Image (cartoon, rainbow, N blue to C red):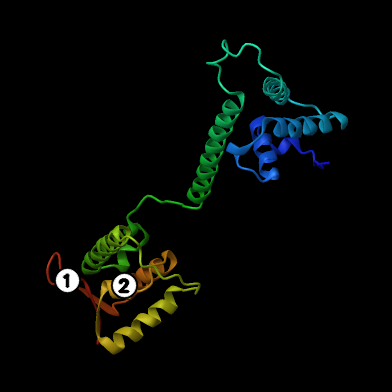
Amino acid sequence: MTEYKVTINSFEGPLDLLLHLIKQSKVEIVDIKIEEIAKQYLDYINSMKELNLDIASEYLVMASELIEMKSRILLPNNNQEEDDYEEDPREILINRLLEYKRYKEMTNTFKELEEIRNKIHTKIPEDIKKYASVSDISYEDSLNVDLLVDAIKKFLERKEQEKPLNTKITKKEYSVSKRSHEIRKILKNKKKVYFDELFDIYAKDYIIVTFLSILDMTRKQEIDIKQENNFSKIAVIIKE
């Protein structure tokens, strides 16, 4: 005898319960037998009654439908000619179950997409110049800041268009002072590097810290930002 764990609240309706019972029986939906699935469903409902649990009306309606289907299959049909065009009750149930299964799978997909989207946070771009003190930034520095902001914007747009993204994930924690020190070492060896070369790891925290480090070093006049033409690459050069 099949043992049932009565947890009706975990099902979203009678079709959900039927899918569960079919899965337990390890048969395909198209291979179900009305007599067997009806017996399993009614046994489940009866076990609920024995525990004095409230049963939603939709579960009872399905129980009556299964009893009717079972009786139509088991009892001889004396009006064969009149019922030639009557749909097979088994086929009707199978179609309902297949349709519900597709709906349920689609719902699960939407839930997964919703969970992924909830992990994404966006922020409207803003002008970072307002965070700088006017006395600390000269006109030339202001031009450099605008140049860098435009460069990082174009860099991120290019990366966004690359499919797939060739990203590297880093678990290191970076600070502006630490990243500035790394940039100084790079420039000490090369004297000059292109702006994009300093963003060798495509991770949000790394990009932000690198960009802030370049801004800070520009403010302190440790580096020069050069661009020969409007559309040429931006060079970062260490000041001697």
Q: Nearer the viewer, residue 182 or 146?
A: 182
Q: Residues within 10 Å of mark 2 (few under 14, many from 20)?
A: some
Residue type, label 1 = Gln
- Describe the element under mark 1 as helix, strand or loop: loop
Horizontal and vertical percent position of residue 88? 58, 23
221 with respect to 229 (left or right): right
Q: Residue at x 44, y 79 (%)?
A: 178
The picture quadrant where one finds residue 8 is top right
Rendered image: mark on residue 227: 1
Numbered circles on residues, count: 2
The picture quadrant where one finds residue 217 is bottom left
Q: Nearer the viewer, residue 237 or 162?
A: 162
Q: Residue at x 34, y 53 (%)?
A: 126
Considering every residue shown, the one lying at the far left of the view is 229
Rendered image: mark on residue 219: 2
Horizontal and vertical percent position of residue 149? 28, 62
State whether residue 24 is above or below residue 14.
Answer: below
Horizontal and vertical percent position of residue 66? 69, 25
151 with respect to 87 (left or right): left
Q: Residues within 10 Å of mark 1 (few under 14, many from 20)?
A: some
The picture quadrant where one finds residue 165 is bottom left
Quarter of the rendering occupied by the C terminus: bottom left
- Describe the element under mark 2 as helix, strand or loop: helix
Rendered image: mark on residue 92: none
